[in-house]
Amino acid sequence: MKQIKYFNGSFLLFVAIFIFTGCADTDDGSYVSPITVSEKTNGDWHLLNLTQIDETAKKAGLNPSEMSLTDQFEFTTFGITLNVDDDGNPTSYAVSGNAPDIFNEQGYWSLDTDFPQTNGTPPTILLYGDAAKTQKTGKLSITGIPGATPEMELKLTRTSNNVPFVSYQFKLTKNQ
């Protein structure tokens, strides 16, 4: 009698699983390419805040190690446009406004990676002086990738003998 109850219980469980899984029709849709960093960063950006960071003082624990430059030297007019082609690949860039030149006012750009790094390393915008992208003129670390809010943070670091001594942290918002 116990065998019959066990068999009936197992049979009912099997039938129940078959019924509920047999009706599930999964439609994953069609393939969509993943969103790239260039898709999130292209467009017209204007400055919200610019901070100069004294990397030497910061490393030594000296204060002040940071200073806001937003209201200095007409940085409030700073803007940057990052252009892409029809396929979403980086092409040219242009800086606008009356701010002092921290990097070239125009040129070409690319990314060192198309996607955010899983190890937390920020993607880098590589700046070039020529369309063939052979004359590198600078690099900007993307320390804040735009997402739910249309804000991006870029960091330009100056070095001497591969030792950083000053950085400029740009907080930008996308022109709508």
Image (cartoon, grey):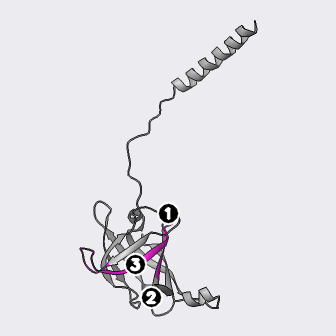
Please tell me which of labels 2 and 3 falls first in the chain. 3
Q: Residue 144 in magenta?
A: yes
Amino acid at circle 1: Gly
For the record, the magenta segment spans 128-156
Mark 1 highlights which residue? 147
Amino acid at circle 3: Lys
Please tell me which of labels 3 and 1 falls first in the chain. 3
Mark 3 highlights which residue? 139
Mark 2 highlights which residue? 161
Query: In this rendering, which labeled residue sits more in front, label 3 or label 1?
Result: 3
Q: Quadrant of the C terminus?
A: bottom left
The answer to whether any part of residue 20 appears in the image is yes
Give the number of the disc on residue 65: none
C-alpha span from label 1 to label 2:
35 Å
Amino acid at circle 2: Asn
Q: Are marks 2 and 3 in contact (CB under 8 Å)?
A: no
Image spot of residue 160 (x, y percent): 45, 89
How many marks are shown on the rendered structure? 3
Identify the residue at image location x=49%, y=63%. Answer: 147
Q: In this view of the protein, which residue sits in the foreground, 101 or 113?
A: 113
C-alpha span from label 2 to label 3:
16 Å
The answer to whether any part of residue 54 appears in the image is no
Query: In this rendering, which labeled residue sits more in front, label 2 or label 3?
Result: 2
Q: In this view of the protein, which residue sits in the foreground, 134 or 172?
A: 134
Q: What is the crowding at mark 1: few (fewer than 14 residues within 10 Å), some, or many (at least 20)?
A: few
Q: What is the crowding at mark 3: few (fewer than 14 residues within 10 Å), some, or many (at least 20)?
A: many
Secondary structure beneath dot 1 equals loop
Up the image or down, 81 lies above or below 146; here it is: below
Image spot of residue 30 (x, y percent): 38, 42
Identify the residue at image location x=36%, y=82%. Answer: 95
Image quarter of residue 97: bottom left
